[in-house]
Image (tube, helix red, strand yellow):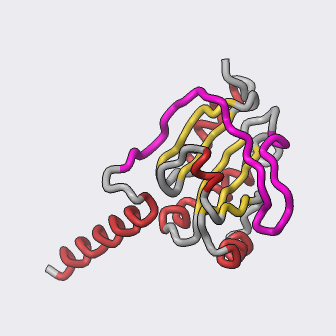
Amino acid sequence: MRRAAAIVLVLMSSAVATAACTGDDDPVEGVVPVDEAMPRVTGESLDGDPVDSGELAGSPYVVNVWATWCAPCEAELPALVDVAGRYDGRVGFLGINYVDDAANARRWQRDYVIPYPSVDDQAGALADDLGFPYLPHTLVVDGAGRLRYRIFGETTAEELSGLLDGLLAEGGVSG
């Protein structure tokens, strides 16, 4: 009986955490193929440096919207760091830190050894311009600057690697 109560408690905690990150009781989950222009992402990094996704043009790149207060964001972070390391030099990565405490975000970036910059999006306007519905949200862009995949919710290294391998196999650009 205690085990069943513990399972129910874990499931309820997970649902509460997901609702806190999504603001939606019935969110879309998983990979959704798209083919649309990717808006340029510019701003200041958490470290105060200028960031411009235009510098990633010519190669596929990944944009991940995250926050330190989002449990699924933290859960997927090791996969993002792993994939960024394995595809270094072939695929660019960029984070967008959404409506978060900048000091906490910088600490996360340091503690998790995130190898790519994150734009500080205190007001949430940048993420909103990208049409994201909830956290975490990952965008996969081809070398021609076309948004090819939206990943709603937590991603895995296997899922993200599969999408990137496909783009790299076709030359990184949409047909």
Q: Specify start and end residues of the magenta stretch as a single range.
A: 27-56
For the point 60% across and 55% down, the residue is: 65
Q: Is residue 93 left or right of residue 32?
A: right
Does 174 appear above or below 97?
Answer: above
Tell me the quarter of the picture where residue 17 sits.
Answer: bottom left
Image quadrant in which the C terminus is located: top right
For the point 77% across and 50% down, the residue is: 42
Does 64 appear above or below 173?
Answer: below
For the point 77% across and 59% down, the residue is: 117
Residue 54 included in the magenta stretch of the image: yes
Which of the two residues, 91 or 158, is positioned nearer the viewer here? 91
Image quadrant in which the N terminus is located: bottom left
Residue 60 on image: x %, y %: 73, 36
Q: Is residue 8 left or right of residue 64?
A: left
Which of the two residues, 7 or 132, is positioned nearer the viewer here? 132
Q: Is residue 86 visible?
A: yes
Q: Is residue 9 left or right of residue 147?
A: left
Which of the two residues, 87 or 128, is positioned nearer the viewer here? 128
Residue 165 included in the magenta stretch of the image: no
Q: How many marks?
A: 0
Tell me the quarter of the picture where residue 8 sits.
Answer: bottom left
Residue 162 on image: x %, y %: 58, 38
Residue 27 on image: x %, y %: 37, 49
For the point 48% across and 49% down, the residue is: 133
